[in-house]
Structures are given as C-alpha cells and as structure tokens.
Amino acid sequence: MKRTTICLVAAAMAFPIAGCSQWQGGELREVDGYQVRVKTDPDPLEVGETAQVVMLIRDASGKDLDGCQVSFRQYMPGMEMAGDEVFHALLQAGQGRYKGRSGEFGMGGDWALEFHFTCGADKRQFTLERHLEWPE
C-alpha cells in the first residue's frame, strides 16, 4: 500500500498543473496590453543549431489566447544576411501556446529575434536580443 501511494504522488508530480507550469521559464514581456513569454530549446541558443521556439500569449486579464497569428524572424543587427527577412510561423498548440522552429544560427555574435503577432484586430511586435558564443 505504501509503495502504491508513493508511485501515485510521483506520477502526479510528473504532470504539470494545466495553465501554471507553461508560464515558467523563458523570457516574460509585457507588450501593449498582452503578456508574452518566449522559450527556446536549446536555451541558450547555440551556433550551428536550429531551435524549438515557443511563445505563450495572454491578454491583460491573464486569459490564454488562442487564434492569434504569430511569426518571428532572426537576424544579426548591423550585418546584412540573405535570411534576414525570412519569417518563421509559430503554429497554435493550445492554451495560448504557439510553436515553431528557427533557422540555423550560423555564427556567434549578437542576434535579434523579432516577433510579430496579431490577435483579433491588434497587431503587435517586439524584439528579444541574444548573444551566441562561438563553440570552443
């Protein structure tokens, strides 16, 4: 009986409570009345790799928002590259989550991730800055 109880507690702890844990980690921003959180895997981003990108969106009252159009581009400020204007779509995954993949981060240095999202008639954008270290 004791072993069963321990297993049930362990199993319960392995599954996050809906709506709570997804809002942990990553970087939180307030963007003109919206709460957004961006997470990447890997974190930190790595030279020569692509990344899974997840953006979470809530309205000002804290309600998870589905049905938004979300995309981002990655570029190195001050360095013109062919892929600078390529936007990657983030697809709706439920509970205010949008997921997609970046392109490859081809070199070390300063990068910008510029996000655009439209929820209803509201169009917003914001930029996150990242510094990628060259691998040793």
Image (cartoon, rainbow, N blue to C red):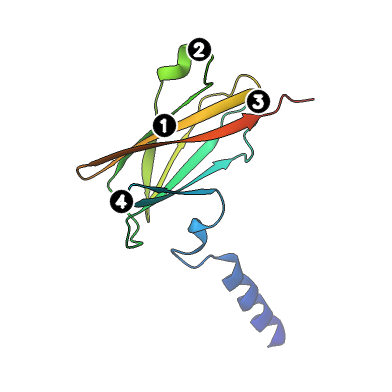
Q: Report the amino acid beneath label 3.
A: Val
Considering only vertical position in the picture, is 135 above or below 22?
Answer: above
Q: Is residue 89 visible?
A: no
Q: With 64 as the anchor, is 8 left or right in this view? A: right
Residue at x 50% of width, y 39% of height: 53
Q: CA distance from mark 4 to mark 1?
A: 17 Å
Residue at x 32% of width, y 53% of height: 65
Instruction: Give the mark, 4 or 1, whose residue is nearer the N terminus.
Output: 4
Q: Which image quadrant: the N terminus?
A: bottom right
- Secondary-structure class at tag 4: loop
Q: CA distance from mark 3 to mark 2?
A: 15 Å
Q: Which image quadrant: the C terminus?
A: top right
Q: Report the amino acid beneath label 4.
A: Asp
Instruction: Give the mark, 4 or 3, whose residue is nearer the N terminus.
Output: 3
Q: With 97 as the anchor, is 106 left or right in this view? A: right
Q: Report the amino acid beneath label 2.
A: Met
Residue closest to the eye, 18 or 131:
131
The numbered mark at residue 61 is none
Q: CA distance from mark 1 to mark 3?
A: 18 Å
Q: Which residue is mark 2?
A: 81
Instruction: Give the mark, 2 or 4, whose residue is nearer the N terminus.
Output: 4
- Secondary-structure class at tag 1: strand
The numbered mark at residue 66 is 4
- Secondary-structure class at tag 3: loop
The numbered mark at residue 72 is 1
Q: Residues within 10 Å of mark 1 (few under 14, many from 20)?
A: many
Q: Which residue is mark 3?
A: 47
Q: CA distance from mark 2 to mark 1?
A: 16 Å
Q: Residues within 10 Å of mark 2 (few under 14, many from 20)?
A: few
